[in-house]
Image (cartoon, rainbow, N blue to C red):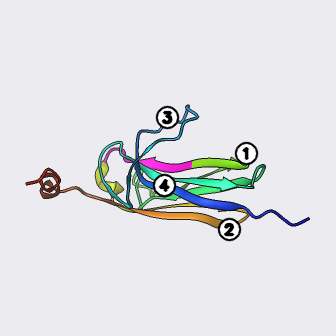
Amino acid sequence: MAKRSVIVDIVSYGIYSTWDSKSKQLPKILEFTTQVPAELDIEFGFTVNIKKAKGKKIRFCIYHPNITSDDGEILEPFDGEEHINSNDWHFYLGDTIWLPIENKLGPWRMTIELDSKTIADKTFDVFAKDEGQFWKQRGF
């Protein structure tokens, strides 16, 4: 019998509605982009669909742009594991901006691995919004 090939698709990426980790609902995509304005509580990341991998485990990682703790220590990347519980499984990997905003600027790389192979990889550029950009978006 032939081995089933896992199918992975990045369904959406960019800015999302607020995610409730207690809900089974994934956040909704608001804008497809890799350019994220540094705004308090903005939610960004990507959603993947993984087929034919029930029972396997993914490993995810979010590499922050040298964000420091209150003590001045650089924070380690945020990582974890999740079990795939169906043969047509959706997973959201994302983060949000918190205070102070100034140290959140730069590239945020998010990866997902399955069987020690990277199956999804997106980098988001979190940038400072200047006042000129604010007025430009409003048509001035």
Q: Which residue is mark 3?
A: 20
Q: Which residue is mark 1?
A: 86
Q: Amino acid at mark 1?
A: Ser
* Residue 115, position as x, y percentages in the image: 74, 63
Looking at the image, which residue is at 7% across and 54% down? 140
Q: Which residue is mark 4?
A: 12
In the figure, residue 9 lies in which quadrant? Answer: bottom right
Please state, as top left, top right, bottom left or bottom right, where the N terminus lies in the image. Answer: bottom right
Return the disc, 3 or 2, that comes first in the chain's sequence: 3
Instruction: Name the one closer to the observer, 13 or 38.
Output: 13
Neighbourhood count class around disc 1 (C-alpha, 10 Å): few under 14, some 14–19, many 20 upward:
some
Q: Which residues are magenta?
A: 92-100
Outermost residue on the right side: it is 1
How many angstroms separate mark 1 from mark 3 (CA)?
21 Å
Outermost residue on the front side: it is 1
Note whether residue 77 is visible: no
Q: Amino acid at mark 2?
A: Lys
Return the disc, 2 or 4, that comes first in the chain's sequence: 4
How many angstroms separate mark 1 from mark 2 (CA)?
20 Å
Looking at the image, which residue is at 16% across and 52% down? 134
